[in-house]
Image (cartoon, grey):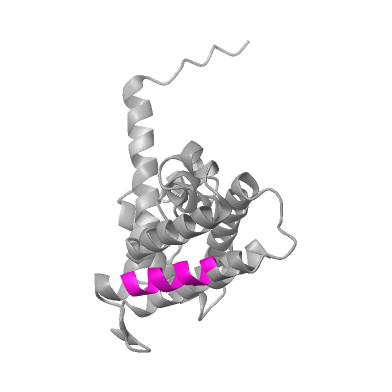
């Protein structure tokens, strides 16, 4: 008869969680500083200052650690953040207000995430297991958001396609602003420039709603 396994002590639980968080953060550090090609088990373990065996013990492997980073590492805005912090209030808005608030919340969320911008830029030049895992997480969050707040598709408006066009434009301009100041006369490195972009998106949304 095997002896009963005792529950881990509180200190052990804290140490495990602290180590787990160090590994998740190490993924973000490597991606930000060196890019996808440098992301591996040994590199992550070195950056976290732990034995690589802990990656397998706590996550199961590098793919699972990457998924944890995508979900826990503030890589992509949450449903609550996209809704502006008040899910109930957002859900009660009319369609036009929802789309405008979503576009602004998304713009603000992407602009304040330089690591996410770096990852999106890397996705344009190479496809790896890392990019695929993070892309899946991103897609699932956005699709879940639309299932929650736009459950019925409007006959004359393909909201998914509209959001794809606006989201891709914002993502591209945010990534471009890391290195390049101007785009078509708009200063991407100033708040005034981004206010112009947000106002333009609002105008596009209003025009689309008016045509229903």
Identify the image quadrant of the C terminus.
Answer: bottom right
Q: Nearer the viewer, residue 127 or 59?
A: 127
> x, y (%) of residue 18?
33, 38
From the viewer's perspective, is residue 30 above or below residue 92?
below
Asked whether 197 falls inside the magenta stretch, the response is yes
Q: Is residue 204 above or below residue 141?
A: below
Extent of the magenta region: 195-206
Position of 40 relative to 175 (above/below)? above
Above or below, 1 against 76 in this view is above
- Percent across and percent down for residue 80 are 46, 44
Residue in view at x 35 percent, y 41 percent: 19
- Residue 174: image quadrant is bottom left
Choose between 211 and 114: the one closer to the eye: 211
Residue at (38%, 49%) from the top-left corner? 23
Viewer-closest of 147 and 110: 147
Residue 194 position by quadrant: bottom left
Evaluate whether residue 118 shows in this view: no
- Where is residue 178 drawn, in percent x and y? 31, 77
């Amino acid at each position: 008869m095997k002896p009963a396994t005792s529950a881990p002590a509180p200190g052990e639980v804290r140490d495990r969680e602290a180590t787990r968080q160090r590994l998740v953060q190490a993924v973000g550090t490597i991606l930000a500083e060196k890019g996808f090609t440098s992301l591996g088990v040994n590199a992550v373990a070195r950056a976290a200052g732990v034995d690589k065996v802990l990656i397998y013990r706590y996550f199961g492997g590098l793919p699972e650690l990457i998924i944890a980073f995508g979900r826990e590492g503030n890589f992509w805005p949450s449903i609550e953040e996209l809704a502006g912090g008040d899910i109930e209030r957002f859900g009660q808005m009319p369609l036009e207000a929802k789309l405008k608030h979503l576009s602004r919340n998304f713009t603000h969320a992407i602009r304040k995430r330089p690591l996410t911008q770096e990852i999106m830029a890397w996705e344009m030049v190479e496809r790896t297991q890392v990019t695929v895992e993070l892309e899946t997480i991103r897609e699932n969050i956005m699709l879940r958001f639309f299932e929650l707040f736009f459950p019925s598709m409007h006959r004359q408006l393909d909201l998914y396609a509209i959001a794809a066009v606006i989201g891709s434009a914002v993502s591209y301009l945010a990534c471009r602003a890391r290195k390049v100041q101007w785009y078509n006369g708009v200063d991407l490195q100033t708040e005034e420039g981004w206010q112009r972009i947000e106002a333009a998106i609002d105008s596009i949304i209003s025009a689309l709603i008016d045509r229903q």
